[in-house]
Amino acid sequence: MSFDSYYWHEWDIPDPRLGELRRKRASGEGGVDTFFELLRSDSVVAVGVALDHYRYEESLTRFGRDNPFEELEPTVLEVARGVLATPPHGMSHASPNPSAPARSSSTQKGETPMNLELVSRKLIDDDSLSVAETTDRIAAWLSAQPDRGAAEAVACLLSTQDRRVAECAALYLALLPGLHEEKTRAARRLRGHEDLVAAAGRLVPWLRTELLEEMVSDYVQGGDPDAPSVDVVYEVGLYQPGLLRPYLSSIEDPDIRLGMMSGAPDGDVPGLVDKWREEDEIGALDLLARMRTEAAAQALLGLREEISEPADWKTFVEMAGRLPDSAERAGHQPAYMGFVADRGDSPHSMGGTYPGEVPLCPLCARPTARVLTLSAEDLPYSLSGDPSFFWYTCRCYAADSVTVKITPDGLGVFDGPCGSGETDAYIVPGARTLTLETHPNQLGISLDATGGNARHQVGGLPRWITPEPQPRCPECTCVMRFLASIDSGPSPFGRMNLDGTLYGFWCDSCQVSSVRHQA
């Protein structure tokens, strides 16, 4: 092993003994006693290094390894809480070690106190790191704090003057469910700073209607279509498009205008149908489908004989919310946003080892990994079994789907080999769960997805990167209903081993799941 620290590798420890313990820990010579002495020391840097080692060892548990410091978790949390209580530099600081005596100065000579502002600036200014690496290191530092770093992220948003730092803090905070009041407080503060307001866009799903209306009004009255607050308005168009319709004539951005199609008035339906019939403009049907309303779906169902390309018609009908062969719902209601959480936080499992055989890549024979297993009894969908979804852990791109039948005796794999799974084959970083929170847009977002934003979903309609027909069940041949999507991007536990987005479909009568991938 050769690991020193996620963040503190550029800071020295003035105390020679602690410096030697740090060296031993980095080289793998030091054991639990070395870790404990660093953790309980009176050195901010030593404590930071120890916390980073705990986080590092915890990250390796996804490969089946044990965390050698697991028995010290209560002490680690105690110390981390003390660190979080330390005020920003420029004020008097408590000791990072709750049991250590208080010091009159903030740190030992040559040391700097830890806080998100400092951590973020140092990483952002490191030209050797990519944006993803910077994001992941900030997330790693925050997730080791109490409450997964929520309080630290909020505190940073309430004080920072750095646009880059605000963006990093808001991005991480958006990975955590709930915290409506905290996110609203942070967004109110960001609203008052033109250089920072764009970061509030990350928090839109949790903000009160009154605040969103105020921020939209700020943008429209400002008269600058490229003002930083356009990022907030863009997100409002995704999650609360109705709030933008009074300002339709004042909003020029084509993506924002397209986002406003979700839930558009039923009175728009005849005009779009007439435009398609009179001008043969397929884009009119695309807009109709993006309304996601019952009126739009019924209009499209009635055009079956008039649309020459069956695949186009099927895709449009499904986008509008209905299945083309039965007129049943194309997805499940209600829709939820999903958040990667720790084990025990939710009944819906992510990652970890799946018992029995799993599908294998047809080229390299590397096993797929379980992405998600939903608990049927904890969802209001009247499902008769727990759907599980799998995806390839290699980069062969040999197939565009993974379809399995869930049986009491294990998985039945369609169109490909199967074999035992491996502990180091993963999509989700570690054995986690998916926590659900009601989606603000129950009709469905009308703008196509981009992937990589950690926007997971259960229920509702798929937000495709590129719209395509939903798959058919290989047993009954019926179109399968959409059930979940898992996005790539960061999580509090590490980055997803995935590009783009996975879309999970489920045939409940046949107990068959199918996963499609787009990037």
Image (tube, grey):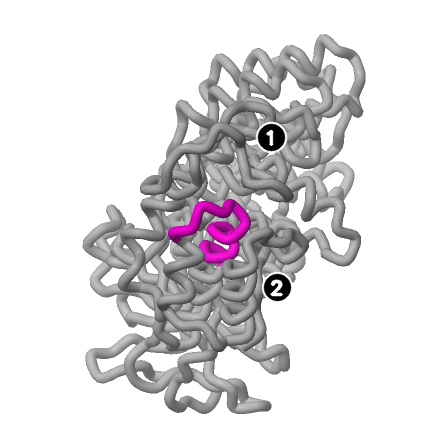
Which residue was labeled with disc 2?
Answer: 499
Q: Quadrant of residue 165?
A: top right
Residue 50 among those drawn in magenta: yes
Q: Main secondary structure of the magenta part?
A: helix
The residue nearer to you, when weighing 509 against 200, is 200
Q: Position of residue 397 (x, y in %)?
A: 63, 78
- For residue 84, above or below residue 246: below
Q: Dot 1: within a 10 Å radius of its alpha carbon, few (fewer than 14), some, or many (20 or more) residues? A: many
Residue drawn at x 34%, y 55% is 342
The stretch of residues the image draws in magenta is 40-52
Residue drawn at x 70%, y 25% is 230
Residue drawn at x 51%, y 59% is 18
Q: Position of residue 354 (x, y in %)?
A: 33, 76
455 sits to left or right of 333: right
Q: Position of residue 512 (x, y in %)?
A: 34, 71
Type of residue at label 2? Asp
- Residue 219, visible in the rendered structure: yes
Q: Position of residue 519 (x, y in %)?
A: 65, 61
Residue drawn at x 60%, y 38% is 288
- For residue 268, above or below residue 123: above
Q: Quadrant of residue 36?
A: bottom left
